[in-house]
Every structure is written in C-alpha cells, then in structure tokens.
Amino acid sequence: MAVVNSQHIINIMERTGMISVFSHSDIRVAKKVLDASYQGGVRVFEFTNRGDNAFEVFKELAEYAKKYNDLILGVGTIFDSEAAQKFLDSGAQFIVSPALIPELADFADKKNILWIPGCSTISEVYRATKLGATLIKAFPGNILGPAFVKAIKSVMPWVKIMPTGGVSPTLENLKAWFNTHVTCVGIGSQLFKKEYLDTDSYDKLSLMVQETLQIIKNLRK
C-alpha cells in the first residue's frame, strides 16, 4: 500500500466519523471483520498490534485489503520506531500509539506519515501538538469521558480529537461524544462483539456498522 497524505486520512476519518479498531489472532476472522466494516461504510481501519502473531496477521490483512482502493489501513498499539517501521514496510498507512512517545513523532515526521498519539491530560495534548500531531487519540475514552474533550476544546478549540477505548455504538454514548465536537471516534470491542465473531454473524456486524455510522451522521445534522 502506498503512503497516503496525512490530511487526506484525517479528512476521511472526519467525513465518516468512525474508524474500526480491531485485532484478532485468526486471519480469517480479521478478513471477515475488515469486509464487514467496509461494507458497512468504514473507510479507515486500525489493526491493533496485540498478540504474538499480530504482525503476521497484519501482513496478510494488508495484502488482502488492497482489493479496496479507498480503504485506509493503519496499525495501533505502537510504542517504538522499530515496530512502526516494520508495520509500515508491510503496508500500514498510519500509526497509532496508546501513549505520547516523542520517538514516534520524530519517526512520523521523517517518514511523512500520520501519527496519532494517545493522550490523557491537557499537558500531553499540548505537547503532542507541538511535536506535530494533527489528530489526538483521547485514551482511554471510557475513563476520560466526554468532559475531557470538552475541557480540551475550551482551551485548544482547534485540536482534532478521536476518543478510543470504551466508546459504545449507541445513540446515548455517541451523542455525548459528538456534542463535544470530536473529529471521529474509534470503536472496537463494543462494536465487534464476540457473539458475532463466534457465530460468523458478519452480516449482522456489517449492519451494526452501518447503523452506527448513520447515528453519527444524524447527530451531526
């Protein structure tokens, strides 16, 4: 996969309002979830670097994802430039970290790729912007809550924020987040429920993705 302009990726995130955040040790499941996400309307997909074989799964998933010309595939849970380079070489088009790591800021700048750091304080958000971050991951979202985003926006209204971790695909939860003018949300386990995966209910999953994106679209009106 080719390197994609960072602003282009953020524009897509903002337009759809949601990215899929997913990881699984079984490539078959990962492919099915990617398909369901795409068919439901997702255009930015983050595969998280978790588990002993995460890299092998990602490599195959990146090759598989090439069939979707307008799908952006990135990798999350990256802590150092060595891992970032490995995934970048295997098709990652952006990197996400659960923490603010200056080493990754330098790496992303040199490689001219989108880097999304995880931040949980106003100081971290400010420092991230000074290090060149153009989108901030508010993490963990379920602990920080919408009040955190509201506080950030009150002093740094220009900052683009993506809450991730514990975001739920319900009207109530999404309304609370989008009322704070988040750029988009990252949704993982709350959307990709184990029961769907265990029963191969990928049509239901695709419908759930579609319904979630419609909720977001309606909220923005």
Image (cartoon, helix red, strand yellow):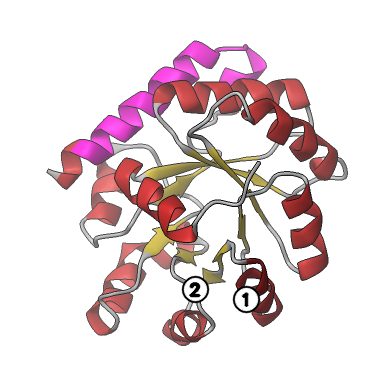
Query: Which disc, if any, is residue 95?
Result: none
Q: Residue at x 32, y 37 (%)?
A: 170
Q: Mark yes or no: residue 102 visible.
A: yes
Give the residue at the far right of this rendering. Answer: 52
Query: Which disc, if any, is residue 133?
Result: 2
Q: Residue at x 35, y 71 (%)?
A: 148
- In the rendered image, residue 50, in percent from the top left (x then y), is placed at 76, 48
Q: Identify the amino acid type marked 1.
A: Ala
Q: Are marks 2 and 1 in contact (CB under 8 Å)?
A: yes
Q: Element under label 2?
A: loop
Local packing at callout 2 (Cα closer than 10 Å; few below 14, some 14-19, many 20+) is many
Q: Is residue 114 left or right of residue 28?
A: left
Q: Is residue 108 left or right of residue 209?
A: right
| Most frequent secondary structure within the magenta stretch | helix
Above or below residue 99? Residue 36 is above
Q: Which residues are magenta?
A: 196-217
Q: Identify the amino acid type marked 2.
A: Ala
The residue where tag 1 is placed is 105
Residue 174 on the magenta segment: no
Counting labels gives 2
